[in-house]
Image (cartoon, helix red, strand yellow):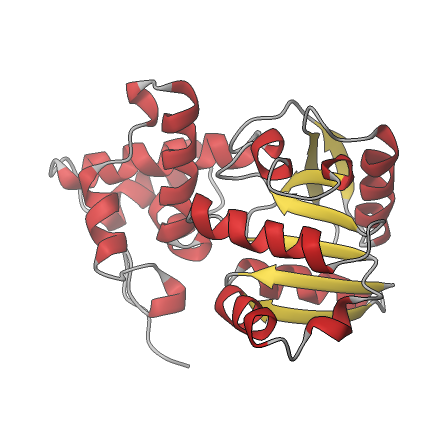
């Protein structure tokens, strides 16, 4: 199957690994490379036989709209479009696409195991046949699927990012150090990884995107991103991918 992936690290790396493991023909782009290639007109012909496109941008709604609009314009009309529903509702994402009935939202959180679970959600425009096709695709990658209601963050990202946001509030207020916050959750709550280390794995920009999407969707202060999280993203302290987040990482 011909699969196109466009998005951000670490999400694209995780999904590319699953797709190649399933022997799909995969093309992978960072967001800026994908949009530049289309703008320069040199890569458009290679999109004519894409069967499934996977969009993995969770930070900016404007950029996400640009990616999805381009996919809708240049991909075949029957190509399935899978959009990361962490920071934007599927209904909103589908509104940016020609033939929105083929858009299905999904949610994954790094690290993605070889045999894990993927949340799926349809928008108000999504066809049942597209949702069924998405379930078959993810199951072919070794993932169990569940269908949940549309909304930013779906289940896991909404839960995990709210936990991360609260942990960053504890750190900002000086309640405990980053090490001690994570140790309390690992040893006291039996979490496999602490919330701040998990944030560094996901990327603080993606966490901020989820919290911003939730806050804009619901207007509830419990979803308001902390000032510390906003400042760290502004300072490009995004976690493992930039070498520094709540913790510091040495280059390999």
Give above or below for 138 relative to 210: below
Residue 113 visible in rendering: no
Q: Residue at x 35, y 43 (%)?
A: 208
Residue 212 visible in rendering: yes
Q: Residue at x 44, y 56 (%)?
A: 201
Figure label count:
0
Give above or below for 113 relative to 50: above
Where residue 163 sits: x, y (%)?
38, 33
Quick check: 213 left or right of 124? Answer: left
Q: Residue at x 35, y 39 (%)?
A: 164
Give above or below for 28 relative to 209: below
Quick check: 8 left or right of 207? Answer: right
Q: Give the quarter of the figure containing the C terminus.
A: bottom left
Q: Residue at x 73, y 48 (%)?
A: 81
Q: Quadrant of residue 29?
A: bottom right
Front-lying residue, 229 or 33: 33
Where residue 50 sits: x, y (%)?
81, 63
Where residue 1 sits: x, y (%)?
87, 63
Farthest left residue?
Answer: 174
Front-lying residue, 97 or 182: 97
Where residue 104 sits: x, y (%)?
72, 38
Quick check: 185 left or right of 7? Answer: left
């Amino acid at each position: 199957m011909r699969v196109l992936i466009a998005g951000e690290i670490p999400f694209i790396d995780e999904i590319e690994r699953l797709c190649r493991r399933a022997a799909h023909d995969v093309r992978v782009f960072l967001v800026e490379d994908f949009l530049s290639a289309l703008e320069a007109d040199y890569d458009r012909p290679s999109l004519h036989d894409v069967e499934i496109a996977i969009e993995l941008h969770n930070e900016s709604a404007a950029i996400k709209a640009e990616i999805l609009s381009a996919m809708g314009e240049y991909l075949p009309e029957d190509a399935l479009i899978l959009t990361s529903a962490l920071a934007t509702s599927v209904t909103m994402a589908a509104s940016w696409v020609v033939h929105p009935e083929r858009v299905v939202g999904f949610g994954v959180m790094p690290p993605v195991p070889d045999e894990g679970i993927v949340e799926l959600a349809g928008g108000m425009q999504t066809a049942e046949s597209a949702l069924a096709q998405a379930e078959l695709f993810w199951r072919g990658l070794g993932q169990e699927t569940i269908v949940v209601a549309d909304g930013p963050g779906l289940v896991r990202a909404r839960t995990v990012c709210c936990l991360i946001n609260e942990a960053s509030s504890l750190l900002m207020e000086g309640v405990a150090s980053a090490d001690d916050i994570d140790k309390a959750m690992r040893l006291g709550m039996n979490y496999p990884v602490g919330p701040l280390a998990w944030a560094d794995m996901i990327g603080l920009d993606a966490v901020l995107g989820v919290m911003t999407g939730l806050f804009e969707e619901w207007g509830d202060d419990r979803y308001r991103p902390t000032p510390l999280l906003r400042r760290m993203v502004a300072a490009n302290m995004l976690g493992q991918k930039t070498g520094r987040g709540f913790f510091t990482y040495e280059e390999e």
